[in-house]
Amino acid sequence: MDDLDRSLLGFLGSDARVSVATLARRLKVARSTIQARLERLETTGVIAGYTVKLGEAARQSRIRATVLLTIEPRAQANVLTRLKAIPEVERVHTTSGRVDFLLQVAAPSTAVLDGVLDVIGEMTGVKSSESLIHLSTKLDRAV
């Protein structure tokens, strides 16, 4: 990736609906150059898709939490399979340090979130869990 690719990704991160022609004007290159770059970035997996980024108004109706899990040795694959079956689990990251998994969970109510946390904590192979409820978002630079 070069500077043009990074600039292109920056513009798309701010507004994925921006047209190829507008991107070409902003980056001062030919439209065909932008189209070729987008195709290459998609083919190589740098761009996995185009999506909607929900604003605070949409997120207010969901309770979000980060869940830190410590997993028993050799149980990671089984726990991950079970986590994938829980629709409220949006993301699962492996980590280095004192915990094995960092989960992002979202639920429509505290009651549903509480139930999901109980299910996760009771899974075979989960040694411990710690939940951090998200109160507000002060900065979001995620692309």
Image (spheres, helix red, strand yellow):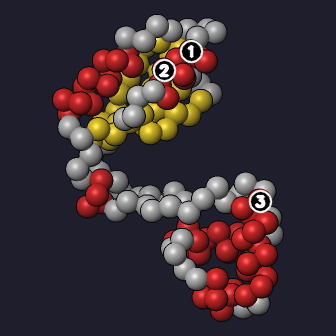
Task: Tell me which corner region of the image, top left, top right, bottom left or bottom right, holds residue 106.
Answer: top left
Looking at the rendered structure, the secondary structure element under dot 3 is helix
Identify the residue under disc 1.
78
Residue at horizontal 61 percent and vertical 18 percent from the top: 77
In the rendered image of this protein, does residue 18 appear above or below residue 49? below
Q: Is residue 10 visible?
A: yes
Neighbours of disc 3 within 10 Å: few (<14), some (14-19), many (20+):
few
Q: Which residue type does callout 3 highlight?
A: Thr
Q: Any mark on residue 82, and which? A: 2
Front residue of 84 and 9: 84
Whole-Å distance between the Cαs marked 1 and 2? 6 Å
- Is label 1 in contact with label 3 (beta carbons under 8 Å)? no
Which quadrant: the N terminus?
bottom right
Looking at the rendered structure, the secondary structure element under dot 2 is helix
Neighbours of disc 1 within 10 Å: few (<14), some (14-19), many (20+):
few
Q: Residue 47 appears at what percent x and percent y? A: 67, 60
First in residue order: circle 1 vs circle 3: 3
In the rendered image of this protein, does residue 5 appear above or below residue 75? below
- Is label 1 in contact with label 2 (beta carbons under 8 Å)? yes
Q: Residue 4 appears at what percent x and percent y? A: 75, 76
Looking at the rendered structure, the secondary structure element under dot 1 is helix
Q: Residue 109 appears at what percent x and percent y? A: 20, 37
Identify the residue under disc 3.
43
Q: Which residue type does callout 1 highlight?
A: Asn
Residue at horizontal 20 percent and vertical 33 percent from the top: 110
Task: Tell me which corner region of the image, top left, top right, bottom left or bottom right, holds residue 29.
Answer: bottom right
Q: Residue 108 appears at what percent x and percent y? A: 24, 41
Q: Is residue 102 visible?
A: no
